[in-house]
Image (cartoon, rainbow, N blue to C red):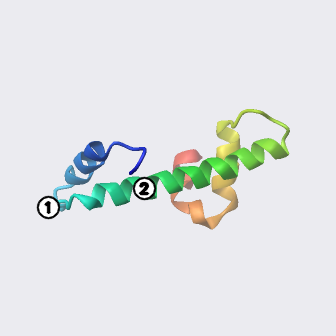
Amino acid sequence: KTKFPTARIKRIMQADEEVGKVAQQTPIAVGKALEMFMVNLVTKSADVAREKNSKRVSAQMLKQVVESDDQWDFLREIVS
């Protein structure tokens, strides 16, 4: 089970003309991957907030996480 709505994930996937039918388990797997991605990114951002003695994660902290690790390089254009 995922915390993201699988029907919406399926709709987003099928919005691409190259995507045909989507198996029932596929949106669930994508939702779980999205959940794991978000947990990882938010956890690292929270670590930065803790280092700065902040109780809030700011956009600048999120940007710092994205720019500090090649794992997030696909997000650099979005946060800059």
Q: Earlier in the sequence, mark 1 or mark 2?
A: 1
Left or right: 18, with 57 as reference point: left
| Number of marks present in the image shown | 2
The label nearer to you, 1 versus 2, is: 2
Q: Amino acid at mark 2?
A: Lys
The correct choice, above or below, for 9 with respect to 56 in the image is: below
Choose top left, top right, bottom left or bottom right for residue 54: top right
Left or right: 61, with 31 as reference point: right
Left or right: 76, with 30 as reference point: right
Tell me the residue at 53%/50% (across/down).
Answer: 38
Tell me the residue at 66%/50% (across/down).
Answer: 43
Q: For numbered disc 2, what is the local secondary structure? A: helix
Q: CA distance from mark 1 to mark 2?
A: 21 Å
Q: In x, y percent, where is residue 16?
A: 21, 54
Instruction: Using a 10 Å C-alpha cutoff, classify the residue at mark 2 as few (fewer than 14 neighbours), some (14 to 19) or many (20 or more).
Output: some
**Rendered image: mark on residue 30:** none
Q: In x, y percent, where is residue 5?
A: 33, 42
**Rendered image: mark on residue 32:** 2
Q: For numbered disc 1, what is the local secondary structure? A: loop
Left or right: 64, with 22 as reference point: right
Q: Amino acid at mark 1?
A: Gly
Q: Which is more toward the observer, 2 or 39?
A: 2
Q: Which is more toward the observer, 69 or 32?
A: 32
Q: Which residue is mark 1?
A: 20
Choose top left, top right, bottom left or bottom right for residue 26: bottom left
Q: Residue furthest front?
A: 1
Tell me the residue at 69%/40% (across/down).
Answer: 60
Instruction: Using a 10 Å C-alpha cutoff, classify the residue at mark 1 as few (fewer than 14 neighbours), some (14 to 19) or many (20 or more).
Output: few
